[in-house]
């Protein structure tokens, strides 16, 4: 699995070592993660299926409590207790089902195969240890014999991110800026040659210029090292700029999924439309912006029957209270109709995305647009 | 009205083992917050925008310059005499999760400052109860639902509304909102922004809006003004819409270029730029402080930095030797 190849992209971050021949795909199927509560077990992630196309950046967007971090942690089989995976599989090419791996193999896979940049990783360094020493700890805990090689790879990665490797590795956490710590988090995630990279809120708490620099680095590292990446954010802007495909998560479900340009130009699920209309933007008509009514649900307030969004939904119908709408692939005919039936939402005017956007759709992805809404798909009880 | 004239602030350094150089947080800043107006301060973290906000609230001292509140220069007053002026300026903090006492219900959180206010006005308990409900309704909360609750029982957006209601208990003339929406869920952010704008219209309060997210500054009102701060100096100032569409200072242009582009509905500005260097703390006058990171720096930028001056006959001010309009901000995607 550690076969190397010369990077085809002449990129500074594409080191000679650790660049894979072919990126791996990740397939999540029917994943449910439940937490015990005073009112019994509640699902933070409910029957989620999601493909991370090989070599692509998938964006997972959702608000706090939508279950996006829980979903991402289950890709490492690291759901925090008392949470429990109650159904589903996470298949990664070359590894198998992560949820079924024995503990020693799981330890190896975390880090060596899947890199994870944690939320607030700016603050997750040990404040009493120099960064370089923590890097060596990481290597030792993964049984790396060649620690010199490890340091060399870290230096190369840091160098590619425009940082001074010697300075950064000899620094303590407080001596580094937020943007530098975030980059260091990415180095830690990739230094063991992981080929699947998960970034949880990679730019939260960074200001605009550091954010732009970190986004640029993610793009560069992703391409240069042939990664399969998952970027999680509450910020549609970050996802819209980085991701090839977007999955919109609400109350533990993926309610809409599709290629970035198409999904943003022509959102179909009422939540996606509401979220887009509620996002402060630098362009566009201020008068069209409106907040989403209600508030995002938490574990206790997620409706147990029917569509989870119906309380905040402007187009809810009686059938929405009965059963939960499944995620359904939209046909090209449905996609070319300008407005889904019964919707009068002030979303961006429907625009047909250009050919170059269609071309950008990942070849290995499950294809088109999927929406979980009866009003849009016209199905239901 | 608040007028800051040439405000400077230096955080002293210290010697010895934990040696630290003095930090010049503000280097002579002029900002005017008009009555009923909205002013936004934008800049990177560490640029001095929060320090300026705290000085305007009286939470922080300044070393030089003058702060004039409703016609009264603050340096002429003793500390105790300043208090009634600063009471008219209320701060809304970034973090609604730590700004409220977790052991007290909303009833008490609002009742305590209102009781003080009632004593000043000679009002009775009935006034406190009426005012409490009035303020909650004003910020869009249902008093019956919210009053008996503790902060942890409310969402971030509701908490921030309680924080705003509490700031309103003293009938302020100015609200200072420091990153007031950055910790709120995205779907609820716009609601808070609209509330702040609504309070301007209905109560006539002015708003000082401090943020690193330029997009949110657009939502403070059509008449709002923007000040761009870099390392303690104003580098550009003007009407918010003008500065976003036609910035002339390279630093403003870098900030606007850094805003993520929503592919499919937006496309990047044709002249998008990025700073050429990492954040820098060393460069000192007489040259332009942004020169080491400026993509358009010329040799004389190293020796000379112009003061803030008007761009030929417009309301836009800048501090650049070579001001030039550039199309950096994202535009709606072509069909």
Image (cartoon, coloured by chain):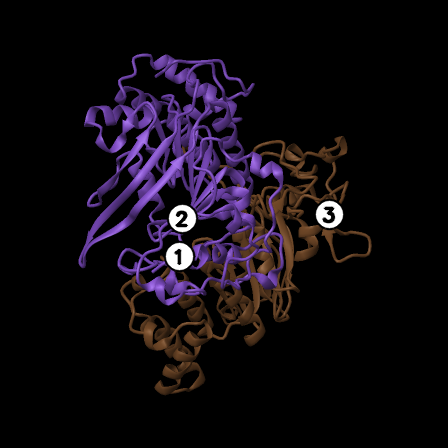
Chain colours: A purple, B brown
Mark drawn on residue A379? 1
Image mark 2: chain: A
Horizontal arrangement in the rendering, residue B124 relative to residue B252 (left or right): left
Image x and y of residue A100, in percent? 22, 31
Q: Are marks 2 and 1 in contact (CB under 8 Å)?
A: yes
Mark 2 or mark 1: which comes first in sequence? Answer: 2
Please determine if labels 2 and 1 lie on a single subunit: yes
On screen, B245 above or below A159? Answer: below
Q: CA distance from mark 2 to mark 1?
A: 10 Å
Image mark 1: chain: A
Residue placed most toward the observer, A250 or B232: A250
Q: Residue at x 47, y 32 (%)?
A: A56
When asked about the image quadrant of residue A32, the answer is top left
Horizontal arrangement in the rendering, residue B34 relative to residue A216 (left or right): right
Q: Residues within 10 Å of mark 3 (few under 14, many from 20)?
A: some
Q: Which residue is mark 2?
A: A328
Quadrant of image for the C terminus of chain A? bottom left
Image x and y of residue B59, in percent? 48, 59
Residue placed most toward the observer, A183 or A35: A35
Question: Is disc 3 placed on a helix, strand or loop?
Answer: loop
Image mark 3: chain: B
Q: CA distance from mark 1 to mark 3?
A: 65 Å
Residue placed most toward the observer, A350 or A112: A350
Q: Which residue is mark 3?
A: B307
Question: Is disc 1 placed on a helix, strand or loop?
Answer: loop
Q: Residues within 10 Å of mark 1 (few under 14, many from 20)?
A: few
**Is label 2 or label 3 in front?**
2
Image x and y of residue B177, in percent? 51, 60
Residue placed most toward the observer, A276 or B194: A276
């Amino acid at each position: 699995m550690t076969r190397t190849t010369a990077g085809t992209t002449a990129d500074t971050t594409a080191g000679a070592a650790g660049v894979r021949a072919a990126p791996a795909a990740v397939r999540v199927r029917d994943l449910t993660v439940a937490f015990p509560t005073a009112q019994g077990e509640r699902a933070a992630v409910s029957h989620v299926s999601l493909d991370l196309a090989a070599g692509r950046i998938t964006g997972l967007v959702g608000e706090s409590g939508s279950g996006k971090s829980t979903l991402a942690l289950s890709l490492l089989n690291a759901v925090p207790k008392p949470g429990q995976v109650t159904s589903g599989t996470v298949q990664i090419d070359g590894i198998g089902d992560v949820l079924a791996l024995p503990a020693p193999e799981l330890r190896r896979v975390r880090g060596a195969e899947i890199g994870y940049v944690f939320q607030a990783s700016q603050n997750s360094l040990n404040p009493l240890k120099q960064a370089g020493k923590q890097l060596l700890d990481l290597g030792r805990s993964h049984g790396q014999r060649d620690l010199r090689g490890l340091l060399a790879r870290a230096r190369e990665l840091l160098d590619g991110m425009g940082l001074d490797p010697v300075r950064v590795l000899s620094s303590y956490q407080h001596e580094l800026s937020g943007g530098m710590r975030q980059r260091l988090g990415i180095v830690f995630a990739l230094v063991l040659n992981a080929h699947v990279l998960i970034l949880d809120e990679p730019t939260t708490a960074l200001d605009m210029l550091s954010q732009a620099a970190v986004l640029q680095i993610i793009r560069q590292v992703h391409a240069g090292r042939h990664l399969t990446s998952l970027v999680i954010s509450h910020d549609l802007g970050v996802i819209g700029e980085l991701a090839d495909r977007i999955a919109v998560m609400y109350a533990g479900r993926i309610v809409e999924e599709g290629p970035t340009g198409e999904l943003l130009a022509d959102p179909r699920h009422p939540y996606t439309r509401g979220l887009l209309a509620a996002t402060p933007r630098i362009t566009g008509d201020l008068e069209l912006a409106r907040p989403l009514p209600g508030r995002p649900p938490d574990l206790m307030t997620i409706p147990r029957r029917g569509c989870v969004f119906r309380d905040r939904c402007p187009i809810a119908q009686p059938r929405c209270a009965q059963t939960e709408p499944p995620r359904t692939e939209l046909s090209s005919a449905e996609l070319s109709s300008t407005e889904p039936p019964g919707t009068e939402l002030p979303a961006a005017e429907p625009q047909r995305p250009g050919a170059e956007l269609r071309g950008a759709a990942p070849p290995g992805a499950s294809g088109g647009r999927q929406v979980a809404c009866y009003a849009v798909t016209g199905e239901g009880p | 009205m608040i007028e800051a004239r040439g405000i400077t602030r230096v955080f002293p350094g210290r010697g010895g083992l934990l040696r630290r150089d003095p930090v010049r947080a503000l280097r002579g800043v002029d900002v005017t917050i008009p009555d009923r107006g909205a002013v936004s301060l934008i800049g990177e973290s560490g640029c001095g925008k929060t320090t300026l906000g705290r000085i305007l609230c009286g939470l922080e001292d300044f070393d030089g310059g003058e702060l004039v509140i409703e016609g009264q220069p603050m340096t002429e007053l003793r500390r105790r005499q300043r208090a009634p002026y600063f009471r008219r300026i209320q701060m809304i903090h970034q973090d609604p999760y730590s700004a409220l006492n977790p052991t007290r219900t909303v009833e008490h959180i609002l009742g305590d400052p209102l009781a003080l206010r009632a004593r000043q006005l000679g009002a009775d308990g009935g006034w406190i109860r009426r005012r409490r409900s009035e303020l909650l309704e004003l910020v869009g909360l249902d008093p019956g639902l919210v009053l008996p609750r503790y902060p942890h029982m409310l969402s971030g957006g509701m908490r921030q509304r309680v924080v705003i209601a509490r700031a309103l208990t003293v009938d302020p003339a100015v609200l200072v909102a420091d990153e007031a929406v950055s910790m709120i869920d995205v779907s609820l952010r716009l609601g808070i922004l609209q509330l702040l704008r609504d309070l301007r219209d209905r109560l006539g309060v002015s708003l000082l809006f401090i943020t690193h997210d330029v997009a949110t500054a657009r939502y403070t009102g059509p008449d709002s003004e923007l000040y761009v701060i870099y390392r303690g100096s104003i580098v550009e100032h003007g009407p918010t819409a003008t500065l976003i569409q036609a910035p002339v200072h390279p630093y403003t242009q870098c900030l606007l270029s850094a805003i993520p582009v929503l592919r499919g509905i937006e496309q990047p500005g044709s002249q998008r730029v990025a700073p050429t260097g990492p954040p820098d703390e060393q460069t000192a006058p007489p040259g332009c402080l942004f020169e080491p990171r400026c993509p358009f720096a010329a040799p004389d930028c190293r020796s000379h930095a112009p003061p803030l001056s008007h761009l030929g006959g417009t309301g836009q001010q800048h501090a650049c030797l070579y001001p030039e309009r550039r199309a950096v901000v994202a535009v709606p995607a072509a069909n």
